[in-house]
Amino acid sequence: MLSAVGALDLGPVLLLADANAPDTGGLADFLRGFFGPLFLVIVSIVAIFFLFTKEVTRFAQFIILAIFIGIVFYVPGIIEVIAVAIARAMGVSTE
């Protein structure tokens, strides 16, 4: 049907999951299992490089950054927990 303006009015459109759609429930676990060891190998190689070149300051900065990235990567729920904690500390209702 055409609306008064002349545009096609479809009303609310609902997208339903097809029975043949792929199951993506374990996708995050698969990607974490695939990229996790790769992340650790890259961190190890770069850390060893900094140690052998005797750049202790860069090594410390890199390790601290790698720890934070690793925490976010291996514990993805931590972002929501931190956001809720910050919001509550600021007095914002999180319910």
Image (tube, grey):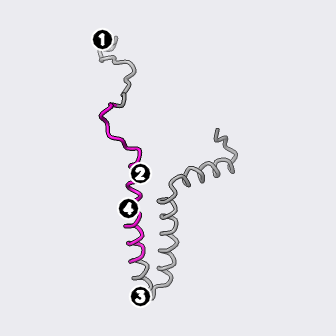
Mark 4 highlights which residue? 35
Q: Which residue is mark 1?
A: 1
Give the mark nearer the N terminus: 3 vs 2. 2
Q: Amino acid at mark 4?
A: Phe
Task: Tell me the SS state at disc 2.
Answer: helix
Element type where label 3 sits in the image = helix
Q: Is residue 19 magenta?
A: yes
Residue 44 is situated, as x and y percent measured from the top left of the image, at 42, 76
Secondary structure, mark 4, is helix
Q: Secondary structure at mark 1?
A: loop
Q: Which mark is residue 52?
A: 3
- Compare marks 1 and 3 and give the one earlier in the sequence: 1
Residue 31 magenta-highlighted: yes
For the stretch drawn in magenta, the main secondary structure is: helix
Measured from the top left, where is residue 86 in percent x and y?
64, 52
Q: Residue at x 60, y 54 (%)?
A: 82
The three-letter code of the residue at mark 1 reads Met
Quadrant of the drawing holding the N terminus: top left
Asked if 7 appears above or below 89 in the picture, the reply is above
Mark 3 belongs to which amino acid? Phe
Magenta-tinted stretch: 18-45
